[in-house]
Image (tube, rainbow, N blue to C red):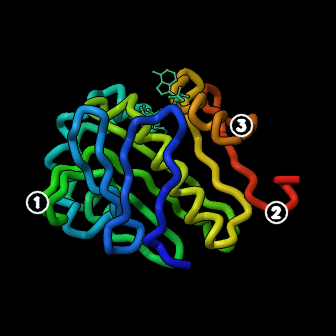
Amino acid sequence: MSHRESIPPHPASSLRISPLSEPWSHRVQLDDGRVLWLRPIAPADAEPIRQVFPLLSSEEIRLRFLHPIKEMTSQMAQRLTHIDPLSQFALVLAEPLPPGEALVGAVARLAIDADTRHAEFAILVSRFLAGRGLGRLLMKRLVVWARQHALDSIYGDVLDENLPMLSLAETLGFRREHLADEPGLVRVRLDLRPEAGR
Ligand SMILES: CC(C)(COP(=O)(O)OP(=O)(O)OC[C@H]1O[C@@H](n2cnc3c(N)ncnc32)[C@H](O)[C@@H]1OP(=O)(O)O)[C@@H](O)C(=O)NCCC(=O)NCCS
């Protein structure tokens, strides 16, 4: 299947999305005219991601990583940007510049759990870009990748106070699961098996 496909717009979203020549890459124009590139994360994104980390609020960091992190070390940034293509997928929304030069404003990733057909997602859309349909766009792209890789489900652990993420997940068809040993956390899971759609 070609990755240069058009993405059908969300009816309520004013994003203008058109394919770029690279796989999984799209030009995204926001309603205020700003242009971003939606593209796979690249190793060269490590340093820009590390540098932009201090701009995140402690709340954004806590919601994404589920615990406080003071600093994004080089090691962490390397780990987040060096993807094993067999078991991981990560997209960024970044300035329309080559990786390494572009500021990164959002990251969404999937990692397949070893020896399973289930993958955990994680997503962060910085508050400078939030509320414009980009979280929904990123999550839908993760779902497309997961379906293409014949995964059984994708899931994420979300703080129970994180209404934006819980609402987004619910509208995409994720179901909540109880995590007995993790008070304050909700697991949301999207069942991708063919029989789940029946
Ligand atoms: C959760 C998050 C990814 C949403 O990204 P976003 O780009 O703002 O989301 P969108 O604009 O695409 O909105 C998608 C849906 O999310 C929900 N949502 C977004 N912001 C919301 C808010 N402030 N209150 C309630 N629901 C909200 C809505 O269901 C919305 O759908 P709608 O626009 O049709 O009403 C973003 O807020 C974020 O990165 N938060 C911090 C990190 C985090 O919580 N990560 C999740 C755990 S891994």
x, y percentage for residue 58?
30, 28
Q: Is residue 79 visible?
A: no
Residue beneath disc 1: 101
Left or right for 20, reference 1: left
Left or right for 154, reference 69: right
Distance from disc 3 to disc 2, alpha carbons, whole Å, reads 25 Å
Could you say which is closer to the camera, residue 129 or residue 87?
129
Could you say which is closer to the camera, residue 1 or residue 71?
1
Left or right for 169, reference 16: right
Q: Is the distance from the Cβ of mark 1 to the nearest ligand 1 atom less than 8 Å?
A: no
Against 126, residue 99 (above or below) is: below
Against 28, residue 24 (above or below) is: below
Circle nearer the N terminus (1, 2):
1
Could you say which is closer to the camera, residue 46 or residue 11?
11
Q: Nearer the viewer, mark 3 or mark 1?
A: 1
Residue beneath disc 3: 179
* Quarter where residue 169 is shown: top right
Q: Secondary structure at mark 2?
A: helix
The numbered dot on residue 14 is none
x, y percentage for residue 181?
69, 36
Q: Secondary structure at mark 3?
A: loop
> Amino acid type of disc 3?
Leu
- Callout 1–callout 2 Cβ contact below 8 Å: no
> Amino acid type of disc 1?
Glu
Distance from disc 1 to disc 2, alpha carbons, whole Å, reads 41 Å
Residue beneath disc 2: 194
Say which residue appears at 32% left-offset and 50% top-offset: 28
